[in-house]
Image (cartoon, grey):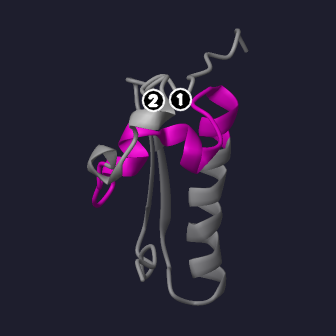
Amino acid sequence: MGAAKQTNLFNDMKSDPSGYSAKDIEVLEGLEPVRKRPGMYIGGTDERAYHHLFAEILDNSMDEAVAGFATRIEVHVRADGYVEVIDNGRGIPVG
């Protein structure tokens, strides 16, 4: 593994907190918060964090299969470096 690239989560913050108010709060919906600050949700954006994310997704698929809610799990490593995990389970709970 090469050197991990770290992203400072506070780069966008104003240096003078006295000018901060409710109008400065940006409400993000859906997956936009994850896209904007992935490190807050997966612990980083380096190779180790992505490995952990993949392991969690695969573990969710395996849990569905063990519980009897999935009969198929597919893992594809694509030529462009993307990894896909596909199963026929119930999906990720959203509530």
Q: Are marks 1 and 2 in contact (CB under 8 Å)?
A: yes
| Vertical position of residue 54 compared to residue 57: above or below | above
Is disc 2 placed on a helix, strand or loop?
loop
Q: Residue furthest front?
A: 18
Dot 2: within a 10 Å radius of its alpha carbon, few (fewer than 14), some, or many (20 or more) residues? few
Total label count?
A: 2
Measured as percent of width and height from the top left, residue 83 is found at: 47, 40
Amino acid marked by disc 2: Met
87 to the left or right of 25: right
Residue drawn where x is 70% and y is 32% of the image: 48
The quadrant the N terminus occupies is top right
Which of the pair 69/45 is nearer the observer? 45
What is the quadrant of the C terminus in the image?
bottom left
Residue 55: give x, y in percent of width and height: 66, 51
Q: Which mark is residue 10?
A: 1
Q: Nearer the viewer, residue 6 or 64?
A: 6
Residue at horizontal 57 percent and vertical 45 percent from the top: 40
Q: To which quarter of the image does residue 57 belong?
A: bottom right
The type of residue carrying mark 1 is Phe
| Residue in the image at 40% along x and 77% along y | 94
Q: Residue at x 66, y 82 (%)?
A: 66
Q: 68 or 30: which is nearer to us?
A: 30
Secondary structure under tag 1 reads loop
Name the side, left or right, on which 81 lies relative to 57.
Answer: left
Residue 40 belongs to the span the image colors magenta? yes
Magenta stretch?
A: 26-51
Q: Using residue 5 as the reference point, say whether residue 79 is left or right of it.
A: left
Give the residue pinned by disc 2. 13
Q: Is residue 9 above or below residue 56?
A: above
